[in-house]
Amino acid sequence: EHSLLIILFIALLITGLPQKFYFLHISHSILLILGGIDNARAIHHIAAMLFVLLALQHIIINFFGTIFFQWKPSMLITFKDFHDAVHNVRYYLGIVEKPAMCGRYTYKEKCIYWLVLTGGLQMIITGLILWFPITITKYVHGQVIPIAKTIHSSEAMLLFVLVVTWHIYDSILSPDVFPLNKSIFTGYMPKKQMERLHPLELQWQKEEADLEAKERVQAVVDSE
């Protein structure tokens, strides 16, 4: 899912930004490579449809998993996340000695997740408006079209800057994970790295392992 999101994100940027910045020479070059503006728009629309399907399956699967299979909603933002953010500001300023103790996901990871998810939903809604302007204006005022265009292009730039400056640093360039945080693809993380970034999750896993070991020992004793 994450790999597909990366591919679609790049495809949408390559085909979308040259249309926003059509007056730049590099935009002309990219559009020529893609075979012209019509081809660029066709690729953009195909990638957009796949992105809609990806977003829908992500939301539906997580909704049903949380409601019917008791998945822990670990990406929900809690008061602890705000406390951790304030604590780390104090840590960076040298007021406290240690960084915040984070669990399975840090406040930064949750923040970028919700920014991408909500931003993606905005892109889907405004993109559909721009794709079918005649149909849309049968039901709403025509002024919605330029508004949607402004939101769509501005949100695209915001997501682009967010990913390039924040997410790539946190996932690749940060000293804590360099040269790459592979956990998104493998599901695993080196113990030392986890001790720094997710100490509460590591503690919970140890407690779970100890409890399982005790239950196995007790089962053996009971069987004897």
Image (spheres, grey):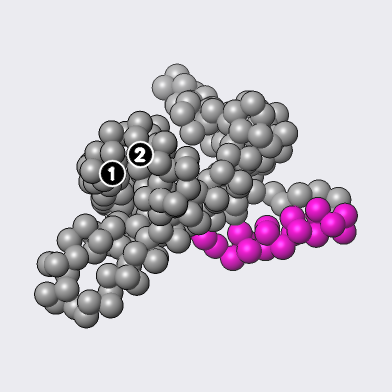
Residue 218: percent from left, percent from top: 50, 28
Q: Is residue 100 left or right of residue 139?
A: right
The C terminus - image quarter = top left
Q: Is residue 168 left or right of residue 33?
A: right
* Label 2 secondary element: helix
- Check the image and report above or below for 148 versus 71: below
Asked whether disc 1 touches disc 2, contact meaning CB atoms under 8 Å apart, the reply is yes
Q: How many marks?
A: 2
Q: Quadrant of residue 174?
A: top right
Residue 126: percent from left, percent from top: 30, 63
Amino acid under disc 1: Ile
Residue pointed to by mark 1: 37
Residue pointed to by mark 2: 31
- Check the image and report above or below for 31 versus 216: below
- Check the image and report above or below for 159 versus 135: above
Q: Residue at x 35, y 39 (%)?
A: 31
Q: Residue at x 38, y 34 (%)?
A: 7
Q: Residue at x 27, y 70 (%)?
A: 145
Classify mark 2: residues with Cα within 10 Å, few (<14), some (14-19) or many (20+). Answer: many
Label 1 vs 2, first from the N-terminus: 2
Choose between 45 and 113: the one closer to the eye. Answer: 45
Range of magenta residues: 72-95
Whether 73 is among the magenta residues is: yes
